[in-house]
Amino acid sequence: MIPDHDLVETFLTPVRICSAYRPAFGSSNSEGVDLPAFQKLYENDPFYAWIGLNDPLVYTAHKMAGGLTSVYRQIGVGTEHLLRAIIRDSLGLTAEETTWSYRYRKPNGKTGVHSLDAKISFADLSDAQRRIFIEWMEVVGPHVDLTPAKRKRIQGVVFEIRQGYKSADSKRQNADLRFGMSAYQEGLLPAFMILSQQVSETVIDRYRKDKMAVLTGTLGGDSLSSTFTFFKQVVGFDLESFFRRNSEKLKTETLTIIQSLLCAN
């Protein structure tokens, strides 16, 4: 079993890069614009200077706004890395066994590749693990309209992992629905694994109606609706307890990063 310390590092490593975030202000500099460069840029813009937008407070506001967006994005990356590591370790799967992607046609005619976050093929599991997953599939079936004939074609499940899902962005929804169709074509049940309870109910309802399983961050739900219950009962890892016993470490580092975004330097 992977030690807690290593799992915490797996989660936090992507998030830590946010402490170095600087707003770009249209600059091509990959490191962003620091405060002196911002002041020079805005002081040389008559309109912005006249109305006071060259003030350091404005820079801090930009840094915090863009930086917080980056924090959420990197928490998503950390969540993906963490849950994939736990799945591999708990089920004895390799990186190759949990990898799945599909090709699709872009609007410009070119071919794109979408890589999913974690695949679990029933054939790669031990007999005991396979029984647990197949029992879970039998219960999930009626909720995603799996007829007995369709159920026979399903040989595993593939997950898209998210930290939360507040957005109702149509482009993302279309990509997610494309993922669902592609997964079914490959004999895999498409599922979303979300850690937060903050999700767009409209989007989640749409996904469930389109025959995709959706797990969210509720603590009281069953393994059909709760990521935490699914991990405990199906994967065999108490994810809730992991976060509770490591909360102080995770909280301290996350707030330190956010505090760094409130500084103008």
Image (cartoon, helix red, strand yellow):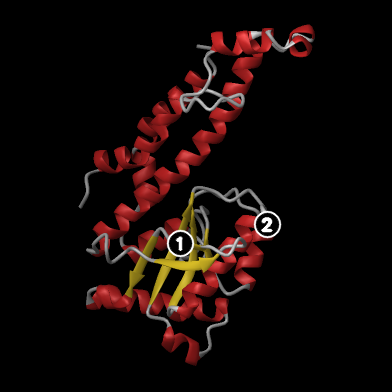
On the image, the x and y values in percent for residue 90 come to 26, 60
Q: Distance between the residues labelled 1 and 2?
A: 19 Å
Secondary element type, mark 2: helix
Dot 1 or dot 2: first in sequence order is 1
On the image, the x and y values in percent for residue 10 come to 31, 42
Residue shown at the point (48%, 92%) measured from the top left: 149
43 vs 231, left or right, is right
* In the image, residue 175 above or below residue 243: below
238 vs 262, left or right, is left
Disc number at residue 153?
Answer: none
How crowded is the residue under tag 2: few (<14 C-alpha within 10 Å), some, or many (20+)?
few
* In the image, residue 202 above or below residue 143: above
Residue shown at the point (39%, 79%) measured from the top left: 135
Judging by the rendered image, the residue that carries numbered circle 2 is 170
* In the image, residue 6 above or below residue 23: below
178 vs 114, left or right, is right
Q: Can residue 224 be seen in this view?
A: no
Judging by the rendered image, the residue that carries numbered circle 1 is 113
